Image (cartoon, grey):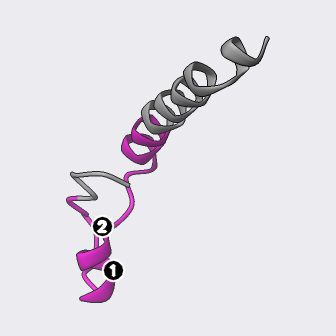
Amino acid sequence: MNTLLGLPFTVGVLVLSYVYGLFRLKQLKGPGIEEYNNHQQPPYKGQTRGF
């Protein structure tokens, strides 16, 4: 049981959360960090790398 819930489970959760984060980031269509800091107006280019 420890083998199943140890490292493989943790890696799986991290991969799923990363994929879900990228999915949500594309759906939100809000400003990226640089656009927000520069007070740019829409249309936003959005965050293109990472989250």
Using residue 36 as the reference point, say whether residue 17 is left or right of it. Answer: right
Residue type at mark 1 is: Tyr
At label 2, counting other C-alpha atoms closer than 10 Å, the crowd grade (few under 14, some 14-19, many 20 or more) is some
Q: Position of residue 44 (x, y in %)?
A: 25, 63
The relative height of residue 18 versus residue 45 in the rendered view (above or below) is: above
The picture quadrant where one finds residue 4 is: top right
Q: Position of residue 25 (x, y in %)?
A: 41, 47
Using residue 25 as the reference point, say whether residue 17 is left or right of it. Answer: right
Which structural element holds mark 1? Answer: helix
Residue type at mark 2 is: Gly
- Residue that appears at 59% across and 29% down: 13
The relative height of residue 38 versus residue 50 in the rendered view (above or below) is: below
Part of the protein shown in magenta: 21-45
Q: Name the residue under label 1.
A: 36
Q: Position of residue 30 (x, y in %)?
A: 39, 60
Q: Nearer the viewer, residue 17 or 31?
A: 17
Q: Nearer the viewer, residue 38 or 10?
A: 10
Q: Name the residue under label 2.
A: 32
Alpha carbons under labels 1 and 2: distance apart? 6 Å
- Residue that appears at 58% across and 26% down: 7
